[in-house]
Amino acid sequence: MGQGFENLEQFAIDVILGRRRGLRATVLRAFLFALSFLYGRIVMLRLTLYRRRILRQRTVGCLVISIGNLTVGGTGKTPIVEKFARALQAGGRHVAILSRGYKSVPLPTRRTWLDRIRGNGSDPPRVVSDGQSVLLDSLTAGDEPFMLAHNLKNVIVLVDKDRVKSGRYAIDQWKVDTLLLDDGLQYLRLKHRLDIVLIDRQAPFGNEFLLPRGTLREPPRNLRRASYIFITKSTGQSNEALVRRIRRYNRTAEIIECTHRPLYLQDIFTGERLSLERLHDTFIGSICGIAAPDSFEHGLRQLGARLDLTKRYIDHHRYSGAELQSFISRCIRRDLEFIVTTEKDAVRMPRLAEGEMKVPIYFLRVEIEILSGHESWEQCVARICRPPPAPFSETFFSQ
């Protein structure tokens, strides 16, 4: 059933992005376009209801910073969340990251069916990290929260669809003073002090259509809610045309250009690290299940790798031992040196027996590097770490 669902999801993605041809795909795109029109009206109605305070935003008594995007996946959000957590922690803030745990498997509930019918109580948020130890695996935490918990010490990581509840839980249990909403731009129930919006330089507004015909969660004009805009996956080349378009929707937000800078390769099982020079002129295989595989594979080639064999899965795919063994066997037949994957994929891979690892698998560790807008980045961090005594400037929903 899981494989069938993934095949259906991949088919839908191919239709949306125009990779499927024929009458059936054309009719389906027309149907999805009609649904996207309805979806867009619902999105704007929801925003209006919050702006007019018909739907009420909750506050939890501490700074709430949202980090999100207008499109579905692929902007490189997790490393940005990690960079913010490290910077705020260094600035003296006690940080908790709140995630919904996309495609994670919930823990068994303590509530009975009778409790649910009566509406009695609720399960506490899943604690991925208490700041000292990682307490869940990637299956029950979700790959991105697990990765953040593994990389960040003294940062609380919680998973729950109700982030008002998880925010209050973090404050009550650990006395945190700053909440980072991972993928929080559309989570309006909890009031944000700042909205950090990420735009992928390679596909700034997806295919320009709203869900489900396209990959946009909101119309581009909703960038006006952004306090800071990060152009991710920048190359150092001019982004003048993109910046001009951004300014059509938001004339005041600071714009920061950044890139995902590779650091090293790390064996997913032994922890052994290799320098990036080992990729140069080396025949390798790559395997990934992410929203933007082209970007990852292009990055490996830019580092000098001879990418001889690639395998792609749907975003957030959970690997089986048989899938890894099959790909390893193909790499052996091609006499490849090793396999490279992403860090997000590495946490979803099962541990193989030592005898089965005939070709080692490494993940590419990356970090965010600011290319342009260094002063804006420092000002953003200072604004959070040393807020003025008066409240922040009015948000979009209080205008």
Image (cartoon, rainbow, N blue to C red):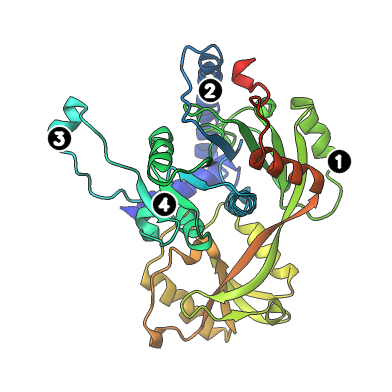
Circle 3: element type: helix
Q: Residue at x 40, y 59 (%)?
A: 138
Which of the labelled discs sits on residue 43, or is there none? 2
Contact, CB < 8 Å: mark 4 with mark 2?
no
Q: Amino acid at mark 1?
A: Glu
Q: Amino acid at mark 3?
A: Trp
Distance between the alpha carbons at the discs numbered 4 and 3:
31 Å
Foreground disc of the pair 3, 2: 3
Residue where numbered disc 4 is placed: 6
Amino acid bearing label 4: Glu
Q: Position of residue 270 (x, y in %)?
A: 48, 80
Q: Residues within 10 Å of mark 4 (few under 14, many from 20)?
A: some
* Number of numbered discs: 4
Q: Which residue is mark 3?
A: 113
Q: Are marks 3 and 1 in contact (CB under 8 Å)?
A: no
Q: Point out the tag, 4 or 2, that comes first from the N-terminus.
A: 4
Q: Where does the image place residue 311, in percent across and percent down from the top left?
A: 53, 66
Q: Is residue 249 above or below residue 353?
A: above
Along the line of sight, which residue is nearer the eye, 382 or 252?
382
Residue 240 numbered tag: 1
* Cα distance between the residues tagged 3 and 2: 33 Å
Q: Are marks 1 and 2 in contact (CB under 8 Å)?
A: no
